[in-house]
Image (tube, grey):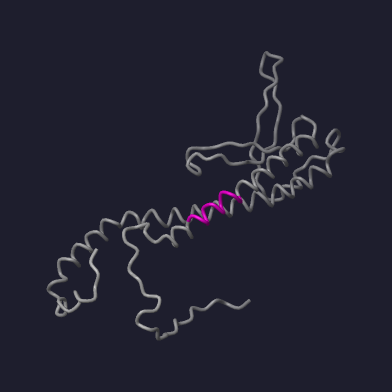
Amino acid sequence: MLQETNLPETESEEDSQSLRTYAPLPAGSDVAMVRYLTRHRDRTVALLGEIDETLELLRRSLNASQPKYTGMIGIIWTHRPDRFNNGIYPAVVRWSCHRKSGSFDLHWKYKILNLRNLPRMAKSSKNFAAGHAQTVEALKQVQKLMQQRSTLLNTWSNLSRTLTPMESSTSDLESLRATLKAHLPALPHYQQSLLYNRDY
């Protein structure tokens, strides 16, 4: 495999008026850039919708392929305050049925499963045998979609982790801008620069 190398940027001469414009100030005034960022947000939301709609049908397929006994595998939709801003996300679980002490009432519990080797976790014994093949095939699709969903959201999580420390340094940027503005008039060619610089 060839390793990526950072190639030096090539210099090119352009006409003094070609492709030049002003800094996109205030923030958000660059319509093209805002459209670019918004488009990727919308693509993410749309793709999540496609994945989640398919996972919901796979949840129903798993329920229809297995008896409602201890050991059946399913999908639940849940949320936690510490994940994705309390957004809803799917989890693959194994169900178990318990009888409350001193009662005939049944109580269902679940354990969230690791996605690794998920199809192999399908039960095939006794009552699970009839739908075992369908369960395995459904779990293969579930595993693939869950991994895609995780990759998609991790990309945004990485972006969030990148933004947080950069946002915390905005006060330093404000201080730097104030210093730069204060020192501008003392620079040797300041008066000449006023002829072709734009102030905001």
Quadrant of residue 110 in the image? Answer: top right
Nearer-the-camera pick, 66 or 94: 66
Q: Is residue 39 highlighted in magenta?
A: yes
Quadrant of residue 23 in the image? Answer: bottom left
Indicate whether 47 appears above or below 60: below
- Percent coordinates x, y for residue 135 in the rendering: 79, 42
User: Would residue 124 appear left or right of 27 to someone viewing this image?
Assistant: right
Residue drawn at x 72%, y 15% as measured from the top left: 104
- Percent coordinates x, y for residue 136 in the rendering: 79, 46
- Percent coordinates x, y for residue 156 in the rendering: 50, 53
Instruction: Please identify the quadrant where the C terminus is shown.
Output: bottom left
Nearer-the-camera pick, 121 or 58: 58
Nearer-the-camera pick, 164 or 101: 164
Residue drawn at x 55%, y 76% as measured from the top left: 4
Q: Is residue 116 highlighted in magenta?
A: no
User: Would residue 6 appear left or right of 119 to someone viewing this image?
Assistant: left
User: Would residue 138 appear left or right of 198 to someone viewing this image?
Assistant: right
- Percent coordinates x, y for residue 176 in the rendering: 23, 63
| Dominant secondary structure, magenta | helix
- Which residue is at the far front? 17
Instruction: Please identify the quadrant where the N terminus is shown.
Output: bottom right
Tell me where the magenta segment starts and ends, as one range: 38-47
User: Would residue 171 appear left or right of 35 to someone viewing this image?
Assistant: left
Residue drawn at x 32%, y 61% as measured from the top left: 25
- Which residue is at the far left? 186
